[in-house]
Structure formats: C-alpha cells, structure tokens
Amino acid sequence: MVYIIIDQFLKGEYRIGKPWKLPEAAGFLVPIHMDPPYKDRDYILLKEANSKVDFRDTGSINIVEVKNESGYNVFIRKGTMLHGEGTQSRSPIHGIIIEPIKKYIPMTVNCIHASHSISSGSGFKASGVAPQSVTQNLGEQSNTWASIDRYTSKLKRAYRAAAPRNEVEHLMEIAEDNLVETENAAKNAVDPISEALSKIPGDHLDQIGVVVFDLQGVVAVELFNHPDSWKAFSKSIIRSYGETLTEKISDLIEIRTDKAEQVFKTFLKKAKKAQTNLLTENSISKIWTLQGKEINGEVAELKGTEIHLSLNRQEKKEPYNRGTEVEYQTQQILRPITQEEAAPQEEEEIDQYMQKKGGYSLLEQLARTPQRFSDLVQERFVSRGTLSTRIKEAEELGLVEKNIRKSNGTPAYTLTETGEKVKKKTAKKAK
C-alpha cells in the first residue's frame, strides 16, 4: 500500500517538468505534474485551516496538544514550525492528520528554541516550514538542536557575506538556537539571498510536487495527491530547500539537468526497496516511515489513499576535515588547499568568531582551567544554546578540543595551542 505513489511514478502516471535553477547555483529543482481529472480532497492543510486549529502547550517538551475545529480533516506536515507564544517553539517530528473533533489530542514534537522556557497552557502559531536539514534531524531532540545550530550559523555567514550589515543587523542579533525568529528575519532581509529565493518558481499548472537535486543527485522528493494541496504550501516547501537551491558553484562545472529524469527514476527504484514501518494511526489515517540504506521518507495515508509523500537522501555524517575543499562533478573530488590559501581564510574566520557574542569569553574561561559544558553553563556569559554553538565553532576552528580530565576521567573542554595564541593576541589588542 505504501508504494502506490512510487509505482505510479515508475509507470509514467506523473509528468516531470522542465528543470529550473538559479544562475551559478549548484542545486536545481524539477516540478512534478499530474493531469486531471483529480479526485476530491478529503482534507485540507494546516495553512488552509487558518485559526481553526488550536495548539496548546502541555508543559512537556515533547508533547503539544492540538484541536481541530475547521470541520475538515487537517494534514500537518513534519517540520511545520510552531511559534510559541510565551513558550518555546516546537515542531512535529512526523506528519499527522487531525480529525475535526472538538477536543485536544497529543502531538509528538521537538523543541526548536533550546534556550526558551516552557509555559504550560500557552499557545502556538504556525510559522512556515523548518529547513530540510533540520526537518531531517527531527525525532532525537539533541540532533534537532545540533542541526539548528549548524543551520543558523551557516545562514548568518551567508547573509553577512551577501548583504550590507545594516540590512541584516537584526538577523545577526538573534540567538543561534532560535530557529523561527532566524527564519522570519531572513525572509524579511533585503539581500541577494532572499531575492534569489523569491524568484524560484514553485507553483505551475497541475503541479503536485517537486524533486530537488544537487551535484550528487536527488536530495529530496515531495508531493501531494492534489494540485490544490501543493499550491497552498508550495512557497514554504520550496524555501525549506533554500540551502540546496542557493548553494554556489564554480562556473567550470556543467550541470546536466537533462539527465534529471533518469537519475530521479533510479532514486525511486532505491526508495521502493526501503523498509516500511507504521509510525502512528488513528481512526482515519496512518503515517508510514520508509527507511533504507540510502533513502528515508514518510507517507501520509487518509482512508486508504496516500495523500503526501516525502523522500530524502540519507546523508552520511562524515567528520569535517580542515584543509580540504570539496567539489562535486560526477564523483567527489578533493583538492588540498595550500598553506598560502588557507592562512588568510582561517585568520578571517577566527576574527569573525572572536567578534561573536561569547567567543572571547569562552576562550577566557578555558584559559583558566579545563571545564565541562555544565561548568561553562554556570558561568552564564551566554545562553545555553549560544554556548553550544560557540563551542562547536571553536572546535571546527581548532581553538578548543575535548579531552579526558585525568583527575576523575570526565571529558572537559580545553584550549588548543592555537586557541591560547588567539586568546593572548585578542587580550593584547584589547589593552
């Protein structure tokens, strides 16, 4: 049952549209079309329900209650950002179809604003869709927080480089763990990145979904069973793939978009081999997960009809190796960076790091003695979420490392030799 949509693809029951990409971008998208006639929808999306779906904080980090008074079945997509009103923002860790019954039911969520407190009984407002890299990590709370830190830090670097400071100043002041506010500020910023995203076409005639590609192949597939569903949610979904669609590429690499359909069908054949598991169900719906070696995904089924499919490439989590630049053509190619190239780049990255809130303070604390994360939290020089981000950035820059403390065997952060030099250099400048 779960593979009906995939089978329909492979049988040619859907049309693949013309590939589209931004100039100089590494990623591109291909629209998916379905010819009429269409069956009537027996549901609407959360975006279409407006204020007739109510969310309430239970006081538990992983449970939010939801009540549907719209009169229709309402589909809520995994990764929908729920902006907390006086409480921490959350996001559902899987899709869910809510029946039109006037009582609250529990919905499993992850927190997407680590440093904000919980307020039982507070409400939420839907605020778009989390970026794909965050949505992919929903489920395990620690993974969600880590993915948010990575995403917001990368986003800020990109906007800082692309726009005048006065146009993105508000964005830079938002804590790295605050995903909703970061995304809203990025949408409102007037700069080349926002302008580029606004030009991405996401709603063609008869379109029901999209395939997103990068230089390694298919990144993701997402579609509904009706054009009205796609139209209602297309802008939010397309933006959620902005990381891939705005990634720059060397003009020496040619992207063969004409090969997209062939690559896509190969991806679908792999998806069909994925293992399916029933994740959750109620009286009218079932949510299935697909898990394979290279692909994962989710299918929402309403009264025996598959209404939404999402497939994602299973990303390999490989260690970050400094001193290499990765480019892709048909295979991964590594080119060592010379010392002459690396030194100015690293110095600039370190200078930018030291200007961030908590950057110098972290090095100052660790210069006194090795400290655990809990010890650093107690110093209260930044929020818990910002501290986590600063530590990760410092580790990537080679300023900080985690070692085992000989006294009791617990891990603690210490300054590296480079970190000590940078700390001393910064202290001298301050004098």
Image: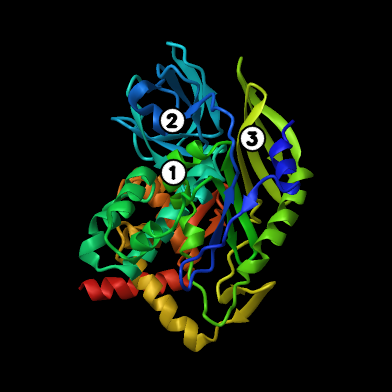
Q: x and y percent of residue 25 in the render?
A: 49, 69
Indicate the amino acid at tag 2: Leu
- Verify CB contact (< 8 Å) between mark 3 and mark 2: no
Q: Quadrant of the C terminus?
A: bottom left
Quick one: label 3 or label 2, which is nearer the N terminus?
2
- Name the residue nearer the viewer: 353 or 54: 54
When asked about the image quadrant of residue 316, the answer is bottom right
Q: x and y percent of residue 113 in the render?
A: 39, 40
The residue carrying mark 3 is 299
Quick one: label 2 or label 1, which is nearer the N terminus?
2
Residue occupying the point 48% across, 56% down: 413
In this orientation, does residue 371 appear?
no
The residue carrying mark 2 is 46
Indicate the amino acid at tag 3: Val
The residue carrying mark 1 is 374
Q: CA distance from mark 2 to mark 1?
A: 39 Å
Quick one: label 1 or label 3, which is nearer the N terminus?
3
Q: x and y percent of residue 309 in the render?
A: 62, 39
